[in-house]
Each structure stands twice: as structure tokens, then as C-alpha cells.
Image (tube, helix red, strand yellow):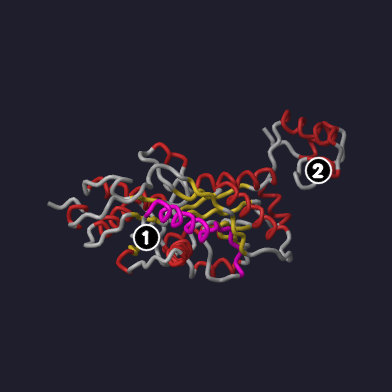
Amino acid sequence: MPSVTLKDIARETGFHVSTVSRALDPRARSALTDQVVQKVNEAAVRMGYRPNRLAAGLRTKRTKTIGVVIPDITNPLFPPIVRGIEKVIEPLGYVSIIVNTDSRRDREQGQVGVLLERGVDGIIHAAVERDDPVLDEIRRAGVPLVTVNRALEDPDIPAIVNDDADGIARMVAHLVEAGHREIAHIAGPEQLSTGIDRLAAFRAAASSFGLEVPEYHIARATRLNEEEGRRCAEALLSLARPPTAILAANDRLALGAFEAIREMGLSCPEDVSVTGFNDYDFLRLIPPGLTTVRVDKQTAGRRSAELVIRLIEEPESKGETRIILPVEAVFRGSVAAPRAAHSEPEQRAGVA
């Protein structure tokens, strides 16, 4: 059975083909009356019309596709970001192609190459490293790029990021108000903007409260996952001078710290307080409930999509290149006043 065309809908409705085309285009239909748009769309649905995107792409030199690059498909941070992206692009006739890098540069390069081969109109990149060589490939292709949740060192590349400094400062303030002076930090990887920025924010916030943070109270994770959080927390809590609180650079690191605390025969928050960053929906269900920083994931996705669409459709337009979204502190049960200092550090570490 032959495909339904715009001419078929024009014959069915009595409108000119150009009118039918505008009525089916979300960006052009505003020039028509609601009655015309409704009649054309009802006919299109009734007749089973599907737009020929390949033919349209040949005419416009656009594919109406947006590449979305994420570092870890298992991380619950990213589905809400993708949902925010799709809420913007779908009504405009765009679709997303989502690729996963597993936080590996070689895989990132291959996946971005696939997106460029598919002729995407723009890329929203949530997996960039601070100095990312794949940027050169995207530049050579002339494809608009926006990063989300992370940023590149290049200030000219638009980025939607969270207010890391404010979020970390709120966590430090909460721990200090609870009575903590020995606060350690599990930092994210140094090649990521979130890792370096949140570490700098931690140092600045601690200094503002007159706290001296020894270098051995900084544990650096190589990946943003539970395994690394567990490893780093074990190292911190095995010190002769262990911290009374651990501020983790993200929630997955914090969940790993929970595991290390349990395995060492300690408890949170009685022996060690823990905080995170991002706020996954399920965290309130995991005892004792993680105190963390809530980021607006859907808004981050929405703003990144709005920006990349503008860069695609108005390539000469100028605007903000760094959009910082506000964050919110979420207080749950993982923070309490520190225990009185023990006479033997080994007792606190659960060592006989």
C-alpha cells in the first residue's frame, strides 16, 4: 500500500499542499487558524500519514535528530535529564539518539563518531571530560554542542551545570552545625569538572568555617560509583585520625561509604555522618536516608535542549554560554552530632 503524502491530505481536506505542510509543522502552524490545523491533523491521523524524514532531510539538510551522550546508562541521574530533553525536542519534531560511553574515552570517541555519521543536527553531551579531545572532531563537523551536568575547560562551549559551590557549602555548613570538625571529602575524578569544582568548593567552605583539612582527609575516586565510594571510605576510616563525617562528591560515592561503614562494624550516623550530591528518588528509602544536594535534573535536560535547538535553528545567535542552575539541600537521617572522642582511635575503627 503506497504511503500517504501531503498531496493526499490536501485532496482530502481541500487545502493547498503548502497549507497542509504548515499545519503539520509545529514551528509553522501558528500562522494558521486552529480550525485549519485541527482539520489537517485529524485527516493526517485518520489516513495514517507519517512524515518522510529522509526526504525532508534532503530538502532542509537536517535530520531532526539530537545526539545525547551519557557516561553511564545505569546511573539514575541521567534518565530525568533525558526526559527533560525529550519534552522540549519532541513537540518540535526532533528525536533523540542516546549513546552510552561507560566513562571510557575510546568508547566516547566511537559513539560520537556514530552520531556524526548519522548526521545529527546537534549534540547534548553529559559525559565530557574537562579537556576532551572529542571536542575537536565535533568542531570539525560543525555540529552544535551543549554540555549538561559537566563542563569543558573551553568557556566558549555552552554548558548547563549545577551550582556545585552552593551545594557543597550547604553540606559543609550542615555538618559544622551538627558539631563536626573532622570532615573528609571523597572527591570525584580530577578529569571531570564536577570532581575538580566540588573539591575546590569543599576546601573553600571548610576554610570559611576555620577548618583545616589535612590532605589525608581527601580521598580521590577514579570513578563515580559505589565501589569507589566504598574503597575511599575504607581508607579514610582506617586512618589513625579518622573523620567523623564524610562529604561525598555524589550519591553513588556516598552509598559506597554506607557499605564501608557497615562492613567495618560502624554505623551511620552514630559513628560517621555522610552526605552526597544529586539526590536520587530512592535515597529516602535507604536507611538512614541520605542527606544530599538535590539538583533539578529535568530542568537541566530542558535547558540544554532549548539551547541546542537555538544553536541549530539560529546559528548566528549569541547568548549565555554557562548556565548555572540552583540547587537545594535535602536533610535526612545520615547526619548527627559526632560521638565524643575515644581514647583509642582503633576502638572507633572497630579494631580489637
Q: Nearer the viewer, mark 1 or mark 2?
A: 1
Q: Is residue 167 within the magenta segment?
A: yes
Q: Quadrant of residue 101?
A: bottom left
SS of the residue under disc 1: strand
* Crowd tier of the residue under label 1, counting other residues whose Cα lies within 10 Å: few below 14, some 14–19, many 20 or above: many
Q: Position of residue 24 (x, y in %)?
A: 76, 41
Residue type at mark 1 is His
| Residue beneath the point at 56% across and 66% down | 138
Q: Is residue 10 left or right of residue 153?
A: right
Query: Which residue has dot 2 on it?
Result: 29
Q: CA distance from mark 1 to mark 2?
A: 53 Å
For the residue marked with disc 2, what is the amino acid? Arg
Percent coordinates x, y for residue 327 in the rendering? 55, 52
Provide the residue designation for mark 1. 185
Point out the residue furthest to the left here.
352
Residue drawn 43% across the image and 64% down it: 206
Q: Disc 1, disc 2: CB below 8 Å?
A: no
In this rendering, the count of numbered labels is: 2
Relative to 178, residue 188 above or below: below
